[in-house]
Image (spheres, rainbow, N blue to C red):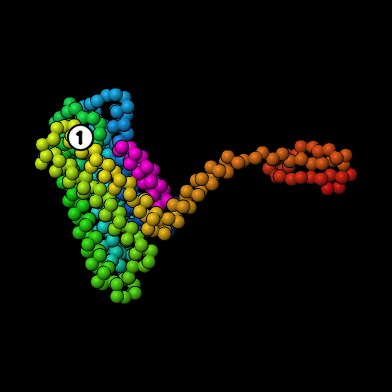
Amino acid sequence: MMNVAGIPGIAANLLLIFVTIQNNKLRGSANYLLALTAFFEILHQSAHFLFLFITVSGVNFINYSTALKFQLHSIFGVTAAQTSMASIAADRLLSVLFPLKYYKLNIRLYFTIHIILAFISGIWMSINAINFSNKYPTLPVTGYISDLLVLDMEIIFNFIMLLCGINVLLYFFVWIVVRWFHSANNDVGTQSEPHSRLFKSLILIVSIVIGGYLIGCLCRIIIDHFFNLNDIQIWTVNQFAGILINIGASAETPILYIFSSFYREAINKQLRSIFYKKTNSKNVVSVYHVSFNNRGGFVRSEGINGKTKQLEIKNNGTV
């Protein structure tokens, strides 16, 4: 079930990154941050391939230290993705509070700062995971990423919930600014229609993505600490929470496609180019160049350099 949600999510996030790189219209800071979040979510969702491999192989458990070798990048990704989402919320707040200064920012330096913050959080959580692995190297786990987030590593759920709360708070402030300060005028500070649509898309992304993470983390904490369930029952409930989280992690691209005309146009263009090339490659027809002589026969001709497609009609030396 994790791969049912994870594999399409990886494909969708890859598509979002690709269209952001290819399309000149998607050069805003929010566009870059969305692509950055998609990259981190790919790292996160790739964790399910290890669990799938272990399940298919018939092995029930592996050591924590062994699992971490294949899952460390996913722990880094899920943590950095949450920080990146908070960066998007902060970016939107800056854009409505200080619109003139915001559009004069050095976007490379600005984007680099957000990348550094995301990497710092991901590295910090990865170090926690390594320390826990050194403490309990032989702890048996199934290879499912949630199994790695136990005992000391439950700190990741608290961190995610903290960032979810910050996201909600920042977007609440954005809504206040847009609602009360920009709705009554059409001056420079007012968001343009495309930016307004992007803002609405971001609100939906936050609602679904943060909603998925928040519900998933709450389920994990409540079930593990307040219900007297056996290990199999807890693992099953955690699977359900993981599905919600993966739906949220896969939601960026579909939401942007539905509610943002810029992204819809860019994605459609990219998909058409992919399928158009495949269709053309299947319909290639070899054409031989022929010339008719004066006796009604025909002779094969390669044309100039073998590339020109000509039909030469010859009659007594006249073409």
Identify the image quadrant of residue 282: top right
Q: Which residues are magenta?
A: 1-20
Asked whether the viewer can see residue 65, the reply is no
Asked whether the viewer can see residue 311, the reply is yes
Q: Is residue 15 magenta?
A: yes
Secondary structure of residue under mark 1: helix
Q: Main secondary structure of the magenta part?
A: helix
Judged from this view, the residue extending furthest toward the right is: 316
Q: For this rendering, which residue is in front, 135 or 272?
A: 272
Taking 169 as reference, is 88 left or right?
right
Q: For this rendering, which residue is in front, 33 or 237?
A: 237
Q: For this rendering, which residue is in front, 10 or 72?
A: 10
Q: Residue at x 24, y 68 (%)?
A: 177
Q: Residue at x 24, y 54 (%)?
A: 86
Find disc 1 in the rendering and name its residue: 235
Identify the image quadrant of residue 294: top right
Q: Is residue 273 magenta?
A: no
User: Is residue 50 shown above or below 208?
Assistant: above
Taking 259 as reference, is 81 left or right?
left
User: Is residue 156 shown above or below 87?
Assistant: above
Q: Quadrant of the N terminus?
A: top left
Q: Amino acid at mark 1?
A: Trp
Taking 257 as reference, is 110 left or right?
left
Q: Residue at x 21, y 49 (%)?
A: 214
Residue 291 locus on image (x, y percent): 79, 41
Residue 46 locus on image (x, y percent): 32, 38
Q: Residue at x 84, y 38 (%)?
A: 297
